[in-house]
Amino acid sequence: MFGLKVISLTDAAAERVKEIMSGSERPIQGLRLGVKKGGCAGMSYTMDYVETPDPKDDVVDEKGVRVFVDPKAALFLLGTTMDFETSKLSSGFVFRNPNEVSACGCGESVELKPAEIAGTH
């Protein structure tokens, strides 16, 4: 899209995506990331299985996995690192997003601003 990688994955995130893909009953090509309006802070991250890739998606091939990024979400996700964390009480994907302005207390909703790309005003 911009000549930049929209997101990057930690080793833990890549391993979890591999586990999800291998445990699927249907053949999947990877995971699709996006954002949707909703939640107490305004937006939330979305994640879906991809059986048939959309040619409009940005594709990130990293560490043996494929992540598809919804083009409508790319500016909100640019520069994000996707991680997978496990604690005593929960486990899940965590997004470290430089475009995040704030987050709600529950951790399910964020306020995002579009990334500013140099020379695109």
Image (tube, rainbow, N blue to C red):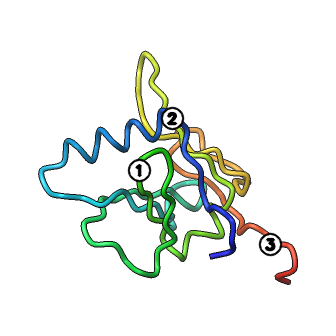
CA neighbours of label 1 inside 10 A, class few (<14), some (14 to 19), many (20+): some
CA neighbours of label 2 inside 10 A, class few (<14), some (14 to 19), many (20+): some
Q: Quadrant of residue 114 in the image?
A: bottom right
Label number found at residue 65: 1
Residue occupying image coordinates x 27% and y 72%: 52
CA neighbours of label 3 inside 10 A, class few (<14), some (14 to 19), many (20+): few
Residue occupying image coordinates x 46% and y 81%: 56
Tell me which amino acid carries mark 1: Val
- Location of residue 51 in the rendering, given as x and y in whole percent from the top left corner: 25, 66
Above or below, 43 against 117 in this view is above
- Location of residue 102 in the rendering, given as x and y in whole percent from the top left corner: 70, 50
| Gap in angstroms between the C-alphas marked 3 and 2 | 27 Å
Q: Quadrant of residue 14 in the image?
A: top left
Query: In the picture provided, is 112 more to the left or to the right than 83?
Result: right
Residue occupying image coordinates x 51% and y 60%: 60
Label number found at residue 6: none
Depth check: give the residue in front, 38 or 53. Answer: 53
The residue identified by callout 3 is 117
- Location of residue 50 in the rendering, given as x and y in whole percent from the top left corner: 30, 64
Label number found at residue 11: 2
| Gap in angstroms between the C-alphas marked 3 and 1 | 26 Å
Q: Quadrant of residue 43 in the image?
A: bottom right
- Location of residue 109 in the rendering, given as x and y in whole percent from the top left corner: 54, 51
Residue occupying image coordinates x 41% and y 26%: 90
Tell me which amino acid carries mark 2: Asp
Q: Earlier in the sequence, mark 3 or mark 2?
A: 2
Query: In the picture provided, is 107 more to the left or to the right than 79?
Result: left
Q: Quadrant of the N terminus?
A: bottom right
Above or below, 64 against 11 in this view is below
